[in-house]
Image (cartoon, helix red, strand yellow):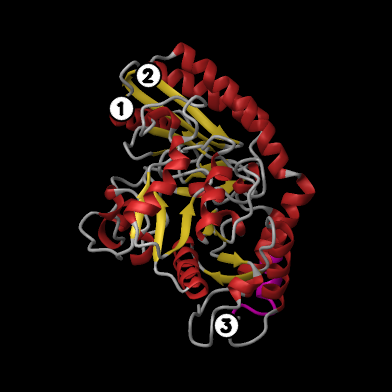
Amino acid sequence: MDTVEKYKKYVNVSMVDKVQPVVIQTAEGASITDTAGKHFIDCFAGISVVNAGHCNPKVIDAAKKQMDSLVHCCSYVYYSQPTANLAEKLAEITPGRLQKSFFGSGGAEANEGALRLAKQFTGKTEFISLQASFHGRSYATLSITGNSGRKKKAGPYMVGCTFLPPAYCYRCHYGREYPSCGLKCAKALEDLIKFNTWDDVAAFIAEPVMGEGGIIVPPDNYFFEIDKILKNHGILLFVDEVQSGFGRTGKMFAIEHYGVEPDIMTMAKGIADGFPLSAFIAREEIADSFRPGDHLSTFGGNPVSCAAALANIQFFQEEKLAENALKKGEWLMARLNALKEKHARIGDVRGKGLMIGIELVSDRAARTPDAASAGKVRDLCLENGLLIGQGGVFGNVLRIQPPLVISQTQLEDVVGILDLVIGKV
């Protein structure tokens, strides 16, 4: 029985439309090879995870070395050196006064823990999130996720969760254009607090660049306006960097593009280049509001994953991955915008760094979402040796999120394949 047949018989994949028909044998950098020997350029990075590249030698070597001495001890029962060293490093590289980290295994676990911490510190019980957001598939994280497609048949969810329309400029909720809009989408937060809550909001949760929602990039001054309102109401700014963190947008963390200081920040995916690890970090006084028994994670802060994360961050800094991602992203955005002029099916191209979305439409004037064409493009890209993602609230956005080590030659091939494939569709 081959791998595909074993999946059909033994692996529960009923929750996905389809598993991409690629049985991966090996991977290196931004390249993947399947069991038949076919090579692919990877432009999805395992959903924005292997930012430092598949099987990065420095990350692998650090993990192997750690395995020889200690694999597991539970880092909340005993002291672990790699865990302590990583927490120190995160305090160094994260923005503002973020200082103390709690480690888990995945993004939803980090977000769930951070929600608990926000309640603990503020003594408040409500949350405001964004429409089109995605924060995980656990009960609390689905409660703050603003997409019914991810939440269907699993409610009722937590009370006290309210949603603000996002800064989705291509499909503005208020029918306006930036910058003449005056950032209505941000200033609307004031009325949302006044009319949609019982004035007991612990935190406002946002992805600085929204991933699953369709690579939605707010204007540069969006979070400045949001932060002013939050401060006036004593509400914490909780930033979800699970997908946008670790160099993806051209900064180590995407919120750094916006000049505001988060009170709590979560991270996962790119933190350890493929090893399971997540964290939420907060200002010291916020973190210390936890009391014995309030929170724990058996595998959080695993020494092997923490050693891999430390090597990953060192590689980022030595190779200037974030800065290079910004330059590569600018080049790629320019080429994709040129394709937009050529192909009427492309309604919008947006992104920061190497976190880029191409929104497909069947009618450019009406901006009619075209999920069917997006699916066809993804399938044809695969046939032509290119792996991309598909997402957005309408399922019509091509997601370009390659390992940040992708070469210029590979990027040129990416543009050529997309040009060919979109033309065919």
Query: Was residue 69 drawn as part of the magenta stretch in this picture?
Result: yes
- Horizontal side, residue 402 vs residue 201: left or right: right
Going by the numbered disc 3, the residue's amino acid type is Cys
Residue shown at the point (46%, 41%) measured from the top left: 187
Instruction: Rate crowding at label 3 as few (under 14), some (14 to 19) or many (20 or more) other CA atoms within 10 Å.
Output: some
Which residue is labeled 3 in the image?
Answer: 74
Which residue is labeled 2 in the image?
Answer: 345
Residue shown at the point (53%, 46%) measured from the top left: 208
Going by the numbered disc 1, the residue's amino acid type is Asp
Residue shown at the point (30%, 55%) measured from the top left: 13
Which residue is labeled 1 in the image?
Answer: 370
Picture layout, residue 338 above or below residue 271: above
Q: Are marks 1 and 2 in contact (CB under 8 Å)?
A: yes
Mark 3 to mark 2 CA distance (whole Å): 52 Å
- Image: magenta residue range: 62-73
Q: Quadrant of the N terminus?
A: bottom left
Residue sitting at the far left: 153
Instruction: Rate crowding at label 2 as few (under 14), some (14 to 19) or many (20 or more) other CA atoms within 10 Å.
Output: many
Q: Are marks 3 and 2 in contact (CB under 8 Å)?
A: no
